[in-house]
Amino acid sequence: MISYARQTQEEQPEASLPPVEEHIAPAPRVSVQAFCETVETAAAVQSAGEDRRLGKAHLKIQMGGMAAAIEAYRSAPTPNVIVLESDGRNDLLGGLDQLATVCDAGTRVVVIGRINDVMLYRELVRRGVSDYVLAPVGAIDVVRSICNLFSAPEAKAVGRIIAVVGAKGGVGASTISHNVAWAIARDLAMDAVVADLDLAFGTAGLDYNQDPPQGIADAVFSPDRVDTAFIDRLLSKCTDHLSLLAAPATLDRVYDFGTDAFDSVFDTLRSTMPCIVLDIPHQWSGWTKRALIGADDILIVAAPDLANLRNTKNLVDLLKASRPNDRPPLYCLNQVGVPKRPEIAAAEFAKAIESQPVVSIPFEPQIFGSAANNGQMIAEISANHKSIEMFLQIAQRLTGRSETKKQKSSLLSPLIEKLRGK
């Protein structure tokens, strides 16, 4: 029998974590109330409420299933989303009919059931049920169902946020983030924006040879003005596919922010850009922690020494615990092979972190120094430098995309170009 219900973890054991290509957009500020019949489902919903993508949603869980929901809404308004668990087909349809008499217009209903039947699915759709999830469910099934209610298929895809942070100061995280963003824009042909979050000492403007009069500080200090048009005016165009939200890099004010200071900026960027690369400064505060946990993918840049190993381990452990339904953060080694400096081998690093680095970028001060002083990317200094391929590997891992195929030139290409010119 054909099933229209979502497949769950029991049927697909490896689906406990979303694949790299799956991108679940965060839910907006909505109220969600769940009425469960089993403690297993209640635990899954509770775990889903702790997921970063439901961080703005207000979730309340009650036991009792359909009967409890009907009783609760006889004298109270219904929330944006109701999640109902039900075991029986007859009770489910009859209960939905009763719930409809007390349910406010606009409320969306998600049903968790155990009957895999196309006729039941059609009856649920006819009664206005937004989604039917086949039990048993995991946290990611609940997250996906609720978030997809607010992501219309015809709507423009919500942008992916990539956070890049250094395990220690001076490891070159900003340089890596800027070159990776360049690879995303040039080689993967994705529209991307780099947001330099180091407002006092950011180097993105220097690296891209840009000196815009406005930047991210204007948005952070005027949160009530932030919208798509306002952000567009602050962006500085670097290439056809790459834009910059620059830091002022001035010390005329103190940049102390609340935990949610950048939320409106990130939300607006998500709605306008397919890819957002956050250049996060090496500091630990409420807003940097929130930016890391809220990102879709994370890259930690580390040098091969003991302090970097400790800090990388601490970051990975924290982010794994805070993002149980996301893939673990990636990390790369930078400045490998400094003459006469004792270093920790990549194999030892991988053993401690329990994962391999994406790449190990060698220490080459001449080309990296020239690029920094000239306001250029490595690809602009040396088109065939080996680090360019490493930046592309990082970009592919973070975005889940392969390199855009370039058309092969034929022997007739020069002649065709001449004819076009004429």
Image: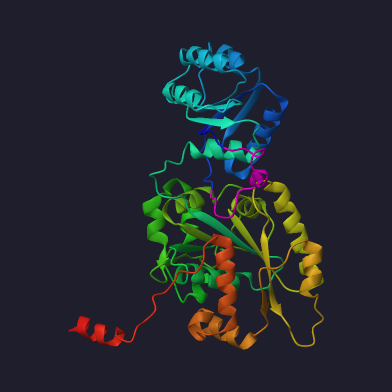
Q: Could you tell me which residue is drawn at 49 percent across and 59 percent down?
A: 275
Q: Position of residue 257 (x, y in %)?
A: 60, 52
Q: Position of residue 179 (x, y in %)?
A: 54, 73
Nearer to us in this view, 55 or 44:
44
Q: Could you tell me which residue is drawn at 39 percent across and 75 percent down?
A: 407
Q: Which residues are magenta?
A: 7-23
The image quadrant that residue 341 belongs to is: bottom right
Which color scheme does this rendered protein use?
rainbow
Q: Position of residue 272 (x, y in %)?
A: 41, 54
Q: Could you tell me which residue is drawn at 63 percent across and 70 percent down?
A: 173
Question: What is the count of numbered marks?
Answer: 0
Q: Position of residue 53 (x, y in %)?
A: 58, 43
Nearer to us in this view, 95 or 243:
95
- Report the predominant secondary structure element of the magenta stretch: loop
- Asked whether 90 falls inside the magenta stretch, the response is no
The image quadrant that residue 104 belongs to is: top left
